[in-house]
């Protein structure tokens, strides 16, 4: 058995490339930055090693979900670029995201298109004379 003089005992002589915690977890969001922000945001609290990984995974999932729905809205409008209007349509048409982001105002997002039953043709109104609810999902009845 030969001993290595001047090197690190038991390690290979080549440099080992360090991997980030995001890469170890298979995430795109920065785990180290989230850990630092959690530590600096709450004075006097200890943050476990798994908390920023979990937070990064949740944020990445929510971002991917919103971007997928916004991409579908952009494709439906025959556009190749997502604009705030597409984000607004994606969030407000999804029940769970609308509940989560209900109090959020998206700048340049516009409003959802809403057709009231009273604004439709009179033929439709006569056929449904006893049904007076609106066709909008989010409007009060």
Image: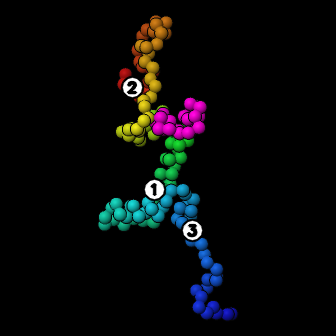
Return the disc, 2 or 1, that comes first in the chain's sequence: 1
The residue where tag 1 is placed is: 55
**Looking at the image, which residue is at 38% across and 40% down?**
104
Identify whether 109 is placed above or below 28. above
Q: CA distance from mark 1 to mark 3?
A: 19 Å
**Measured from the top left, where is residue 128 in percent x and y?**
46, 10
**Measured from the top left, where is residue 32 in percent x and y?**
47, 64
Identify whether 57 is placed above or below 71. below
Residue extent of the magenta highlight = 70-91
Q: Secondary structure at mark 3?
A: loop
**Looking at the image, which residue is at 45% across and 9% down?**
125
Residue sitting nearer the eye, 99 or 5: 5
The residue where tag 3 is placed is: 19
Q: Of all residues shown, which one is farthest toward the right? A: 1
Label 3 neighbour load within 10 Å: few <14, some 14-19, many 20+: few
The residue where tag 2 is placed is: 139
Query: In the rendered view, does 79 fall on the left or right side of 131?
Result: right
Label 1 neighbour load within 10 Å: few <14, some 14-19, many 20+: some
Numbered tag placed on residue 123 in the rendering? none
Q: Based on the displayed image, in which of its 4 quarters is residue 69 positioned?
A: top right
Residue sitting nearer the eye, 74 or 139: 74
Label 2 neighbour load within 10 Å: few <14, some 14-19, many 20+: few
């Amino acid at each position: 058995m030969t001993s290595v003089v001047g090197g690190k005992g038991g390690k290979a002589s080549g440099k080992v490339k360090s991997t980030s915690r995001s890469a170890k977890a298979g995430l795109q969001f920065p785990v180290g930055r989230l850990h630092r922000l959690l530590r600096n945001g709450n004075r006097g609290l200890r943050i476990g090693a798994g908390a920023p990984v979990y937070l990064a995974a949740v944020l990445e999932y929510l971002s991917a979900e919103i971007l997928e729905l916004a991409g579908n809205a952009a494709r439906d409008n025959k556009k190749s670029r997502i604009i705030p209007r597409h984000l607004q349509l994606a969030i407000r048409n999804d029940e769970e995201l609308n509940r989560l982001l209900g109090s959020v105002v998206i700048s340049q997002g516009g409003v959802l298109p809403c057709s009231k039953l009273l604004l439709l043709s009179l033929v439709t109104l006569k056929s449904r004379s006893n049904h007076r609810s609106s066709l909008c999902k989010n409007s009060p009845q």
